[in-house]
Amino acid sequence: MFSVFKWTLWQRRWSILWWSVGIVGLVVLTLSFYPTIHNQAAQLNKSFGSLNSSTLALFGGTDFFSPVGYLNSQLIYLMLPLLLIILGVGLGSSLIGREEGDGTIQLLLSRPLARSRLLLAKALAGAFILFSVTLIGSLVILGLAKIVHIGIPLISIGAACFACFMLVLTFSAFAFLLASTGRGRGAALGVAAVYALGGYIIGSLANTVHWLQKPSLIFPYHYYQSANILRGTFRWSSIVFFGIFIAIYMMLSWLSFRRRDLG
Amino acid sequence: MDSALSTTKLSKKYRGANRYALKGLTLQIQPGEVYGFLGPNGAGKSTTIKTLMNFIQPTSGSATLLGHDIVKDTVRIKREIGYLAGDGAFYSKMTGRQYLEYLGELQRPVSKKYQQELAKRLQATLNKPLGSLSRGNRQKISIIQAFMHQPKLLILDEPSSGLDPLMQEVFYELINESKTRGSAIFMSSHILGEVQRICDRVGFIREGELVAERSIAEMTKDATQTFDLVFKDTAPIVKLRKLSSIQNVVENSTNSVTLHVRGDLTSLFTLLSQHTVTHIDTRTLDLEEAFMHFYQSQGDKHV
């Protein structure tokens, strides 16, 4: 099992590197503007005040230029998860999906390797890649937050980054589930992306559009309260929901994959 | 002693399909036996192999490899199996060496020395990415990964396709060495000369059903002669068909026929002496003709 894990990382080594570079670039670009934006916060708040509450909700709240507002709206609520979701959903759909599409899964299963172990090794490799890229991005956020004196406790920023990782892992696990049922990489990628994007829109609007509040409960984005984490008012029990989603998706992946026809 | 491979009424019907891809396959292969599995594309060869390897689940029936159930004991079985896929799946960015290292790690113990010996004999290119290699060179590496742990049972799907004649010879040597060690080999092939040369027994599969099973020795013993005849006038088809020694008459044109004859030829030559024969050619039945015989009747059935 460790061999599958190790060689999967080896196969994705360049992808890990370039995604890390991309995430670091985004973080540097976003946080390096913070001092300039911070100085003009009052003026900018006035301009954005004319937008309606639903539109503001899509960008992560109503406060864009306070330390929490800026970090949340520009990075933690949307852009960082968005980029990581692209990576995570891509990984989830291809870890098993590509092996199956290329026929190499049969090579692996022609060895004394149980399907459950193959599935677990692939899932762990995907989680490890996602965690590594998130960790690199998080460390750069923490470093730059200190440099630009953003004024948010580093522990809160770290916690928000962890919540972001759990959110993305949930979508990645969903794509992994779809690929494990043999729907194909394209279908897994597409459906998981719609699930993530739809969940983001519904979760963001649920605070202002009353009838969306109940449907939003089934989408992981509802439990991603990054602004509250940065303010230190987050209820950590919400993170448990990500764990539950991931556990359910992984269980369904295994049930589907263990006996189905491959190739 | 347990059969190396044994199936009992093994069947597979894919979801949504209206016919069986594999129907009631019953066969046994003993240790040290080389079994050729023949059939046209879509006949069920790959389905059989995928079912045996537990990549797909049988709809009904059962099978054992090396005495163990193919579904329940699949992991245990695969410690002793060498498999070569027909579609030549590979990791394009890995070099041959990395590919063998990966598969070797999953299939311990693998003798590095034997792996190197195989690479040398097959003149395999191990330092280039597999995606940059020709099909034949990739096939050599696929052969190495199937043989490198000296398995007790080899399941090979079109193993020599893409190999040049020199490397085909090396492959045949490897088959013979495995056979000598007591390994059983189950292989599908389109190269009938190869099957005739290296197999002990052949099975013909058609539309998912095993339609015939013959040993090569038996086929040689019962060899039927084939005559290609050209008559000056219309060939006496009706009279030819009435002769008891004639097994099959293929009408090539109005004055040209191919006859498959077994036993005494006197009655045939008596009949021919009454006609003007302008050309006569004779051959001993080989596997290719047996193959054509089985599958031509399938074609006739569909006309």
Image (cartoon, grey):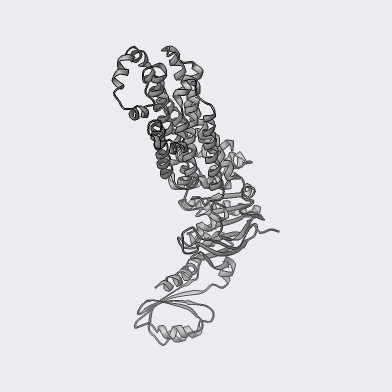
Taking the view exactly as shown, the residue that stands out farthest to the front is A210
B144 and B205: which is toward the camera: B205
Query: Which residue shows up at 64% across the image and 60% down it?
Result: B30
Query: Which residue shows up at 45% across the image and 45% down it?
Result: A102
Query: Which quarter of the image is occupied by the C terminus of chain B?
Result: bottom left
Query: Does residue B260 appear anywhere in the picture?
Result: yes
Q: Give the percent coordinates (x, y) of residue B251.
A: 39, 77
Taking the view exactly as shown, the residue that stands out farthest to the bottom is B274
Query: Which quarter of the image is occupied by the N terminus of chain B?
Result: bottom right
Location of residue A201 with respect to A257 vertically, above or below: above
Q: Give the percent coordinates (x, y) of residue B46.
A: 50, 57
Q: Give the percent coordinates (x, y) of residue A251.
A: 56, 42
Location of residue A51 with respect to A252 vertically, above or below: above
B160 and A125: which is toward the camera: A125
B260 and A102: which is toward the camera: A102
A202 and A21: which is toward the camera: A202
In the rendered view, does A239 fall on the left or right side of A22? Answer: right
Query: Does residue B101 appear anywhere in the picture?
Result: no
Q: In the rendered picture of this protein, how many numbered marks are placed on residues?
A: 0
Q: Give the percent coordinates (x, y) of residue B19.
A: 48, 64
Location of residue B14 with respect to A94 vertically, above or below: below
